Image (spheres, grey):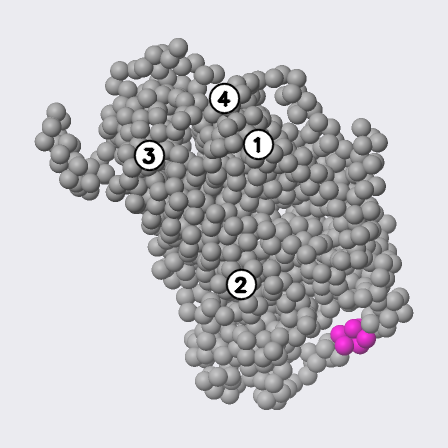
Amino acid sequence: MSDAAHAHDDHGHHAHPTGIMRWLTTTNHKDIGTMYLWFALIMLFSAGTMALLIRAELFHPGMQLMHPDFFNQLTTMHGLIMIFGAIMPAFTGFANWQVPLMLGAPDMAFPRMNNWSFWLLPVAGIMLLGSFLLPGGAVAGGWTMYPPLFIQGGVSYDLTILAVHIMGLSSIMGSINIITTILNMRAPGLTLMKMPLFCWTWLITAYLLIATMPVLAGAVTMLLTDRNFGTHFFNAAGGGDPVMFQHIFWFFGHPEVYILILPAFGIVSQIIPTFARKPLFGYASMVYATASIAILSFTVWAHHMFTTGMPVASQLFFMFSTMLIAVPTGVKVFNWVATMWKGSLTFETPMLFAIAFVCLFTIGGFSGLVLAMAPVDIQLQDTYYVVAHFHYVLVSGALFSIFAGIYFWLPKWTGHMYNETLGKTHFWLSVIGMNIVFFPMHFLGLAGMPRRIPDYALQFTEFNQIATVGAFIFGFSQLLFLAVVLKTIKGGAKASDRVWEGAEGLEWTVPSPAPYHTFETAPVVK
Amino acid sequence: MKSMWQRAGVVGAAWAASQSALADYAYNLQPPVSQVARDVFHLHNLIMLVCVGIFIVVFGTMFYSLFKHRKSVGHKAAHFHENTTVEIIWTVIPFVILVGMAYPAAKVVIEMKDTSNPDMTVKITGYQWKWGYDYLNDGVHFYSTLATPRGQIDGTEAKDAHYLLEVDEPMVVPVGKRIRLLVTANDVIHSWWVPAFGVKQDGIPGFIRDSWFKADKIGTYRGQCAELCGKDHGFMPIVVKVVSDEDYKAWVAKKKGIAQTAAADNGKTFKLDELVERGEKVFQANCAACHQANGMGIPGTFPALNGSKVATGPIDAHIKIVLHGGRPGTAMVGFADRLSDVEIAAVVTYERNAWNNKMGDAAQPADIAAARGGAAVAAAPAAQ
């Protein structure tokens, strides 16, 4: 890398720093996008290792490998790091790379803020991972941080609050950048309703982030002052209410769910038309469906809290509003299927991941519908059914769309084609492994196994063993993904500018690999 | 529209009937023994059926397309897009299906929340990590703790059939009676859950929420805490014995007799070894989860008692911590409300004479009674 930078210097119209300073000081959207994606991958492997430790402990009934408190630390940190460290930064990485290329813009609107919003993340990541080394270990109160349990913990709890603040700052700055870029820096002629769907989903996601991250910041700040400064926001003895935290948290937390999936919808909506060689069926209805989902996401939060004991009217309201979200989500799925219908389909790795996304995300959507029914939810709340549900939407949903996006754009980013055989092997191992881990969890939840327990009753043994075997298949398959990416960066068949036969859009008009600076003069879109 | 959901209901019921024969296998909801649980069971079957139907239609279409419309079989791409009629149809149909689902679900919600006209009321309190039961009509009170021996968890003994789902003192209720539950918690949020009754209610410290069930079959039903409540969240099961009315009355009489004997003990003076022996049991049930059976605690999280300043220091300070708790914000809560004078005297004595702590002194029930009175007087001015 430093060689490349040197070569660039020799051509030298302006002096770039080299080595580590290049990456610390860069304001280039491509560099920053790359760093976001590498950071996300490192976090994916860290939190994935925690998941494998969890599954290893759950292979047999009884406590074999660890103490229950350490088990709780693993489940908590697995959740926090996957959400805030892996999935969200990966999508921001895609936005950094692709939004300017898709809009015909030379860079993001605020390049220096872009640098700052990335470099906050490793700081927060080190705090979270480092908290395992503190006295008492890492946070063990669940990623949802419910008080009063969260009030009981040691110093790592305060450190985690700080890390959440830092990651929230990073997200807000990233969002401001994305909104400003999309609204102001589109090429002449590229109206909002001509913009690639990925930009639309990110625009809406960025608004969700700006609306909800401050709410999370408020909630964790109240935890901090309850812990350290004698306030009683969540302490009934001082006039507070522990359930108030849950309302505030889920007012952030439910839109957060869509923050984790709307960019995935965007990626898949780029990929399916490309490999169907046919335009997206209902572009406008996709935009409206995305916006509807985002707006509805603010009215459903208390469906996470049916077991707290809400009045009938609230239960009914939150049940109905939650079921309503199935309508725009259904519109999206129907649109993807209609886009494939009578296309000319080919099945390269990005398309395989996109098809698996549509199918498996829908399974997660259906289990979401089951959970939306308040009486059924009361049986299934806090069981493995919920674990199965959100891993179907986050692993086969968000994560598979990230894999799809990487395979789709990696040739544009590196100038090399990835190895198709290895890519397809990675796909099949992932999709099979993922279903072996998470499908049996539906049965465990129905049969009555609570989540977040380090040990379980004997009737749950078989499905837990199957899940653990699947987890190791799925987990170790990701090393193959790392190998494919590294191999593609080092070399491989030369990628053409357009890369894919059916590719449409401005990003495919620039050379592969995309030069360090693109669209210094804006293209004109007819 | 109405006939549509009714038809779906009929198919759902048929499916449910075929399922109930298989319900003993652990892959579906547990066999329901209350009306609410049965309604939830059927509601789940109904929505599963709807989901499976939609899945087959949508993905049948998709997979047909994946096989027929591929480039490798020479299919040329059509170029149609946007069709308002189709888009309205696929917005309206899901909406109608959802309305059909919402109606039966709303009926069950209303049924679940109706806690009126109970035959009896039980207050349930979640503690880290046990359950407390107060029978408000019959004056019975007890705690219910995991009965699975440590050796089964650590793998040194064979696990029995109800591993982790067995308790020392099950909740006992009469069959066919409406039982109102007042659920709360003492420290953090817990959740009282018995799947067979269709009841899951969070216990929220400082607040009381109610729920109810009416069990229609005699038997033993098992559940677990369903809200992460710390280290031993997985080790605080719930066992409910549903018995006949006569058996219930006999059980109440027996529990009252035990309570009277315990009250009489508070006035007695005991020998050191009697207190140590009794204290060991109290320690195992209340203290060993954190401080560990060997008194070594868990470094960095829970302090050791073996050789600790408290257990080998002045006995008054030791009694005070057991009664009123440790430093604020730690998991060490006070046991003043949970243990009787004789139990606190026994556990304090045990802690001072177990392991390497050879203090040789004993706390008597009278000392605890005095400490309770003294603390109340001392606390009064501090509150002002």
User: At 46% from the left edge and 79% from the top edge, which residue is drawn?
Assistant: B306
Which quarter of the figure is the N terminus of chain B placed in? top right
Where in the figure is residue B375, as x and y percent of width and height? 57, 66
The answer to whether marks 4 and 3 mark residues whose Cβ atoms lie closer than 8 Å is no
Q: Nearer the viewer, residue B25 or A164?
A: B25
Characterize the local packing of mark 2: few (<14), some (14-19) or many (20 or more) Cα atoms within 10 angstroms: many
For disc 1, the marked residue is: B68
Type of residue at label 3?
Pro
**On the rendered structure, is A157 left or right of A325?**
left
Q: Which residue was labeled with disc 2?
A: A58
Start-end of magenta stretch: B254-259
Residues at marks 2 and 3, CA–CA distance in whole angstroms = 40 Å
Callout in the foreground (1, 3): 1
Q: Position of residue B150 (x, y in %)?
A: 57, 75
Disc 4 versus disc 3: distance between alpha carbons? 22 Å
Q: Circle 4 sits on which residue?
A: A279
Residue pointed to by mark 3: A411
Distance, label 2 to label 4, CA atoms, is 46 Å
The chain under label 2 reads A
Which residue is at 54% across, 47% downward? A391
Which of the pair A133/A456 is nearer the observer?
A456
